[in-house]
Image (tube, helix red, strand yellow):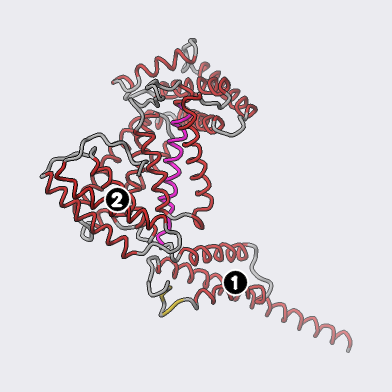
Amino acid sequence: MTDSPVVRAPLDPAEKPILDRLLQVRDGLELLRQDKSTYVKSQDIIGAYEEVIVQVHALDEKRKGKRTDDSRVDTVLDDCFQLISLAFMTIGKNHEAPAVYSAVSNAKRLLDHLKEAAFFYRKDVESISNRIEEFRDIVKRSRQSYDPHLSNLLEARVEACETIVNVLKEWLAPLRENKELCNTYERLVSILRTLSACNTKSKFPAAEVDSIKQELLDIEADLRQKNILKDDRSYAKRFEDHIKVFGTESSLHPSAERLVADLHTRCALWVHLIQEKQGKVEEKFQDVYQKLLGIRNHLDKLTLTQAWSLRETDLFQFQRQLDRIDESRVDGHFLDSEGKPSDLHAQRTLLYLLRKSYALIFQLLISSEAVSEALLPIYNQLNTLKRCLLEVKNAGGCASIRELYPYSLKLNSIDNMRVEGKFMVGNDIPDGQGAVTQLLEECFEIAYDLRNQAEDAETQERGDAGEGEKDDDAQTK
């Protein structure tokens, strides 16, 4: 596990047996993750979870209340919980406490980065806040089913997330009272993120960046007219002053005007920097840049093909690579091999890729279906069938029952796969039966409605044809 977070504290010799056992569990989980020849089975994951909990109790007994999160044991323990969490999602147990562990950890990373960046949409905070509430509910419901150590750990992490959420909401509070400035602020957030995306494209989009620069100049003229932007110094000097006061008491409750003015300064300086660099990161940081770029691009593709190609446990390798890069920073700065910090362009570029990757992982986690990977092929087929049937319905239905034959045949073939009402894989009954059965019933219901419409249409057509024949006979007579 070369991509585990950096270990800082030395190992207590008394904890060596615990570490050895945790390493065995982690290696076993890694083998399960890498084995694509079969699906992950519930009994394997439940067994790994129970073994880890045994070691947690042993560790707690050794430490007798002392807390540390920096030793080798804590690092491997976190690896085990992360893998178990992702595996719980893979087997369809998304709404149980162990499955929450990975999502909460990722949410904490995201919130830390939002706080560090000091620019974000209100909807970013609200979205994560809503998810945190869902996680808390899951932990609360699962408290009787899982070990108190896990529940207490998850509750503490949820509370840490809620604390940061409250800070971020307070940061944006002044904008709620000024809708016009709020719109300008969110426009600037969008510009800054768009510029960062342009900066990491394989071919630098000069025309697009020029267009954004003009948009910034228009915003600047508007802010100066409203006397919000008064400083005539260079963007670099203004940004330097912003950095000096950032994090101090005077910056904890900025006014709406200050929030907008500072963010405009950052955007203006950023567009200048990326035009100067043309998307080229200094050579000393090319390795980490290429690594982050590769992770971001891979995760981006997964968001498009998630339903068909994602095994949640695969996200573990990306999480750990990102954690290692994130934790290698010193006072927030990326350092080269000589211990020297990167320039502002490289720093901002690397941070953008790091934060974007964490955001993509979080998106993949929260959009994971509560269906075992063993049932996903059936679930995905039913989802596709449902979309097709709805498209037919929205387009006015079928002209005849014959047009429904392909959908009916597919639905019946899936329905016939059930054994005593259950979808079986070998002798196992995978999790997610309820979700798949409900989706199958929805498809049958839509198909039934379409069939009735088609029968009515055919009856009406025959009736119209009959009336036409009577009229012809009458005219002949």
> Relative to the observer, which residue lies in front, 53 or 150?
53
The relative height of residue 237 versus residue 68 in the rendered view (above or below) is above
Asked if residue 148 lies left or right of residue 32, the reply is: left
Question: Badge 1 is on which residue?
Answer: 407
Question: Badge 2 is on which residue?
Answer: 80
> Relative to the observer, which residue lies in front, 365 or 253?
365
Instruction: Tell me which segment is drawn in magenta.
Output: 348-371
Residue at x-position 56% and y-position 22%: 277
Q: Mark 1–mark 2 contact, CB under 8 Å?
A: no
Residue at x-position 45% and y-position 12%: 237
Q: Residues within 10 Å of mark 1 (few under 14, many from 20)?
A: some
Q: How many numbered marks have been drawn onto this rendered protein structure?
A: 2
Magenta stretch, overall SS = helix
- Tag 2, which secondary structure? helix
Q: Earlier in the sequence, mark 1 or mark 2?
A: 2
The percent coordinates of residue 15 (x first, y second) are 17, 45
Task: Give the numbered dot on residue 249.
Answer: none
